[in-house]
Image (spheres, rainbow, N blue to C red):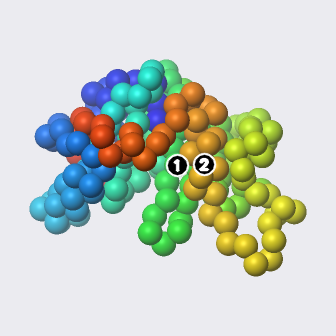
Amino acid sequence: MNEWPSEEVLARLGGQAEPARTGVAAIVEAAFDLMDQSENTRQFIAMATVGDWTLLIEPVGHLGATEERALPASAGTRWVSHFRNINGLASFLWAQDTTERLTFEPGVPDRRWGATPDELLEPMHHSGFQFWDEISETEQYLGGEAAFALAEHLTGVRITPELFETTTFICGSAQIG
């Protein structure tokens, strides 16, 4: 999520416009269609303005979560991203004006890096992240809900299932790589 309008986010990621879609199911379908049509050279991006922020969804990609794309795109603004794939790989990135403030894997919040890796320790605890001394041996923890809660702390925007289902998203695509 970032503080720029959707069209600006698309431009910062080097994207081109695609038809708008309503609801996450339509976005996922369009993302897989584009992946097949472009022989996996373009990535589908869906964006919606929520408060003063732009919510970016990438069902089969992670341009907004990579340091290579997110850090330059954060110039003059803040960028907060949470990535999680089907294999359980996850990351959280908070950038501000091209500086990586905090990056970590939500399932392992003890390993953090960036310019201010400890600035959000208290909000991370309040958001529900479990640190090594807090995890039981039998519990599997990926930190997805906590990542959304931390993003809400940083942005003031609460992401709900209804938002994903009823919002009309401005869509685009960007070259991979």
Three-letter residue code for mark 1: His
Q: Disc 2 or disc 1, which is closer to the eye?
A: 2
- Residue 20 drawn at (x, y percent): 18, 38
Q: Amino acid at mark 2?
A: Ala
**Of 99 and 106, the residue lying toward us:** 106
| Residue occupying image coordinates x 55% and y 60% | 90
Whether residue 33 sits left or right of residue 66 in the image: it is left
In the rendering, which numbered label is found on residue 177? none
Q: Residue at x 46, y 42 (%)?
A: 160
Q: Is residue 144 above or below residue 122?
A: below
Q: Position of residue 151 (x, y in %)?
A: 58, 39
Q: Quadrant of the C terminus?
A: bottom left
Relative to 88, residue 67 above or below: above
Rendered residue at 45%/21% (across/down) = 52
Return the residue at label 2.
147
Q: Is residue 68 something that shows in the picture?
A: no
Q: Residue furthest right?
A: 133
Q: Based on the displayed image, in which of its 4 quarters is residue 150 positioned?
A: top right
Instruction: Give the image quarter of residue 61.
Output: bottom left
Whether residue 77 sits left or right of residue 153 in the image: it is: left
The residue shown at (30%, 50%) is 24
| Label 1 element class | strand
> Residue 51: x percent and y percent?
44, 23
Q: Secondary structure at mark 2?
A: helix
Within 10 Å of the Cα at label 2, are there few (<14), some (14-19), or many (20+) other Cα atoms?
many
Camera-side residue: 93 or 86?
86
Task: Point out the tag, 2 or 1, that comes first from the N-terminus.
Answer: 1
Residue 138 place in picture, x, y as percent: 76, 78
The residue lying furthest to the bottom in this view is 138
Measured Cα–Cα span from mark 2 to mark 1: 7 Å
Residue at the spot of label 1? 82
